[in-house]
């Protein structure tokens, strides 16, 4: 029942919801939210299950956002217990999704149940946005739901994303932004030939390596108060036939920028295209994919309420951070919402034996409840 966050977390972990499967998680959550007075809508886009639920008639809209999908388990022999049995051992809850992020979802649901029971005439609105496509392509999940909300004129004012944000102690770190992520795939064409006759060939790899070295040495920016400098990394490189005496006629590379708000997709692409021309590489040799733009909540009522709730229930002052990868907050923040990510420790996410301190599930739920109370009562 309401408040039993650990029990709900275990039930969710037991469901094998590897992306894009939901395995009935959202149906279970929807039933509980409906019983708490939420209007629940199930949204199926492609192969992805999404849930939108809202309680309250008017006023500021605070949304709990999360995902019910998990990454694959990897080799089962690497686990001390079957990954979908939600085992509790030595006060740890072990299982796939324990920290990323079924415990957060359970904590959110129970926090909302208690809040609705304790403040039936509360101001504002409480909502849930859940998807089964956060760990995958992230096309038919939160991105699609946000488009659906926009078409209906529904705007989120405050959003708590349940991503595992904590470092050493629950609540010690909250993500108030994320860097953008831009991917490039270069395919450079030259002319294959014999290594003994380089004048008769055009080494595609040499030109590509010169470009990559140029980009790696470039000073992109210095970052700012909240963000580190933009980072460029090469992730894959491929060329050649496998023979030692053949000059490659085609060379490919994949690379990524994690960029702060001092950059954008256009500024990065413009510099790369300029360097392509300098190295004799056609600008259309690169295919681009923007995973998400940077976003940040620098100040506001949501940060104030979160800091106060963490101080009340955990007895610590939290640190604001923009470190880490991307999250579905990148689809919500551009609408003007204040967005924070608050969840359990992230030291075992995506690993075998993923775990969370069992007591932290309820502690996290109480922090969530404290945030809602400060914003809507």
Image (cartoon, rainbow, N blue to C red):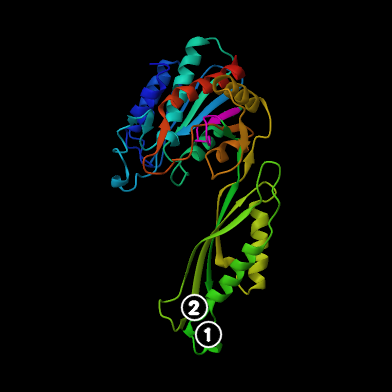
Q: Is residue 289 left or right of residue 300?
A: left
Q: Quadrant of residue 31?
A: top left
Mark 2 and mark 1 residues within 8 Å of each other at the beta carbon: yes
Is residue 156 in view? no
Up-down: is 249 above or below 111? below
Q: Main secondary structure of the magenta part?
A: loop
Circle 1 SS class = loop
Q: What residue do we see at 56% from left, 19% from top?
A: 370
Q: In terms of depth relative to the viewer, which is nearer, 3 or 119?
A: 3
Give the residue pinned by disc 1: 201
x%, y% of residue 340? 58, 32
Examine the structure image and report whether residue 43 is included in the region drawn in magenta: no
- Of the numbered discs 2 and 1, the one sitting upstream in the chain is 1
Q: In terms of depth relative to the viewer, which is nearer, 372 or 335?
A: 372
Give the residue pinned by disc 2: 249
The C terminus lies in quadrant: top right
Q: Quadrant of residue 227?
A: top right
Q: Is residue 235 left or right of residue 268?
A: left
Q: How many marks?
A: 2
Q: What residue do we see at 59% from left, 26% from top?
A: 316
Q: Which residues are magenta?
A: 158-171
Circle 2 SS class = loop
x%, y% of residue 6? 39, 24
Label 1 CA crowd tier, 10 Å (few <14, some 14–19, many 20+)? some
x%, y% of residue 28? 36, 25
Q: What residue do we see at 50% from left, 15% from top?
A: 115
The N terminus lies in quadrant: top left
Q: What residue do we see at 36% from left, 45% from top?
A: 72
Up-down: is 68 above or below 75? above
């Amino acid at each position: 029942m309401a408040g039993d966050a650990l029990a709900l977390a275990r039930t969710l972990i037991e469901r094998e919801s590897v992306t894009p499967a939901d395995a009935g998680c959202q149906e279970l959550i929807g039933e509980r939210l409906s019983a708490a007075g939420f209007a629940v809508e199930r949204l199926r886009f492609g192969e992805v299950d999404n849930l939108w639920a809202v309680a309250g008639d008017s006023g500021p809209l605070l949304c709990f956002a999360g995902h019910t999908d998990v990454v694959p388990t990897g080799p089962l022999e690497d686990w001390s217990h079957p990954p979908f049995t939600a085992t509790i051992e030595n006060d740890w809850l072990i299982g796939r999704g324990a920290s990323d992020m079924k415990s957060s979802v359970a904590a959110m649901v129970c926090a909302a149940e208690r809040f609705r029971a304790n403040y039936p005439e509360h101001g504002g609105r409480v909502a849930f946005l859940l998807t089964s496509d956060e760990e995958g392509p992230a096309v038919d999940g939160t991105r699609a739901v946000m488009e659906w909300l926009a078409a209906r004129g529904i705007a989120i004012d405050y959003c708590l994303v349940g991503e595992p944000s904590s470092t050493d102690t629950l609540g010690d770190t909250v993500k108030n932004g994320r860097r953008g992520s831009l991917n490039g795939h270069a395919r450079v064409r030259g002319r294959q030939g014999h290594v003994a006759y380089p004048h008769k060939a055009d080494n595609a790899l040499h030109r590509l390596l010169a470009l990559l070295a140029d980009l790696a040495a470039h000073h992109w920016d210095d970052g700012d108060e909240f963000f580190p400098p933009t980072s460029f990394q090469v992730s894959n490189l491929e060329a050649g036939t496998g023979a030692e005496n053949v000059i490659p006629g085609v060379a490919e590379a994949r690379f990524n920028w994690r960029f702060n708000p001092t950059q954008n997709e256009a500024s990065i692409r413009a510099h790369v295209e300029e360097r392509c021309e300098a190295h004799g590489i056609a600008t259309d040799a690169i295919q681009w994919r923007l995973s998400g733009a940077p976003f940040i909540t620098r100040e506001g009522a949501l940060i104030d309420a979160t800091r106060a709730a963490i101080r009340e229930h955990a007895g610590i002052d939290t640190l604001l951070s923009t470190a880490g990868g991307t999250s579905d907050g990148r689809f919500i923040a551009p609408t003007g919402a204040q967005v924070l990510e608050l969840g359990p420790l992230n030291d075992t996410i995506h690993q075998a034996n993923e775990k969370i301190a069992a007591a932290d599930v309820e502690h996290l739920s109480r922090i969530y409840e404290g945030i809602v109370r400060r914003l809507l009562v």
